[in-house]
Amino acid sequence: MDTQRKDQEERRERVKDRIATTTAVIVLLAVWEGWVRLAHIPASMFSSPTQIVQATIDAWPTLWPATQVTAFEGFVGFAFAVLSGILVGIAFYCFRTLNAALYPLLYAAQTMPLITIAPLFLIWFGFEISGKIVITAFWGLFPIAVQTIRGLKAVPQFYSDVALTCGATPVWTLWHVKLRVAARQIFGGVRISAAYIFATATTAEYLGARKGLGIWLQAAYNSFRTPLIFSATIVIVALTVLLMAIVNVCERVLLGPVENDENPDE
């Protein structure tokens, strides 16, 4: 009975949170629209939500193909980032010398500004889509690798002791015990990477590409079509939200609800 009451209270709180968020968004859009209209701000300087929506609809025949290119680069690059980030993290965890020598560099690499490194990727890979996938994967793997290392180091020793006592090999213990216990923290790194993967792809395109949202955004900027700049921003945010939702669903399917980790007896 107490459990049912608790679940009902949690559902009510979630509904209240969603109502509050929806109300805040509606109020923000209304204030934004009213301010632009009443202040008679030129669309080339700052656009209202209705102007952005109309511009997006009008430009959709060119916006959609650009979105497909950036989405492909982002999703494929992210997949490579997840795979390589976890493998790099495992390698650093397993080999102490490698970790001592290169972990500070791996950690510091997250602070490198994209604009200073992207020209090198343009020289190496040119303006093709493959180069954008490489640079997206490269930038996306760092937080995943760092969180994988930290997650594995944080696994209590008794998990390994129990598995080894029961006859498990060190390799089996790593893949089936330690990674499972560290999985929540690893997913934290995956979410960090997902949060800026499409922004990275778009920035790489902006600095040099043949097609994609970055080139589309550059054309909008060069022609002073401010509503289209907002349109590209909205598309990037939408792609990011979609990727974050996929990550959350994967985490829930693979690991179950977070509440089960906090209350394993329930």
Image (cartoon, rainbow, N blue to C red):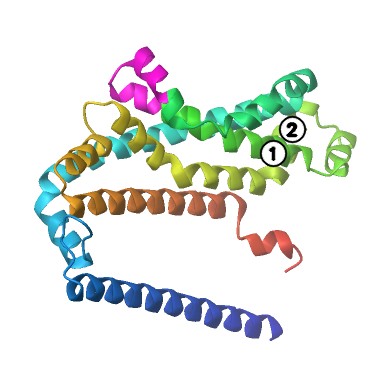
- Indicate whether 185 appears above or below 100: below
In the displayed structure, does residue 183 sit left or right of residue 138? right
Q: Amino acid at mark 1?
A: Leu
The circle drawn on residue 80 is none
Magenta-tinted stretch? 118-133
Q: Position of residue 205 (x, y in %)?
A: 30, 31
Q: Residues within 10 Å of mark 1 (few under 14, many from 20)?
A: some
Q: Is residue 266 above or below residue 128?
A: below
Tell me the quarter of the image containing the C terminus: bottom right
Task: Identify the main secondary structure in magenta.
Answer: helix
Q: Which residue is mark 1?
A: 179
Residue 86 lies, in percent from the top left, at 60, 32
Q: Is residue 83 above or below residue 224?
A: above
Look at the numbered disc 2 and give the secondary structure of its residue: helix
Q: Find out whether residue 128 is within the magenta segment.
A: yes
Please, what is the three-letter code of the amino acid marked with disc 2? Leu
Residue 38 is left or right of residue 151, and the answer is left
Q: Is residue 55 magenta?
A: no
Label ID, residue 174:
2
Where in the figure is residue 263, as x and y percent of width and height?
74, 65
Residue located 54% across and 32% down the image: 141
Question: At x 18% / y 43%, what residue is drawn?
Answer: 220
Residue occupying the point 43% across, 40% down: 197
- Asked whether disc 1 touches disc 2, contact meaning CB atoms under 8 Å apart, the reply is yes
Report which quarter residue 63 is drawn in.
top left
Q: Residue at x 65, y 40 (%)?
A: 147
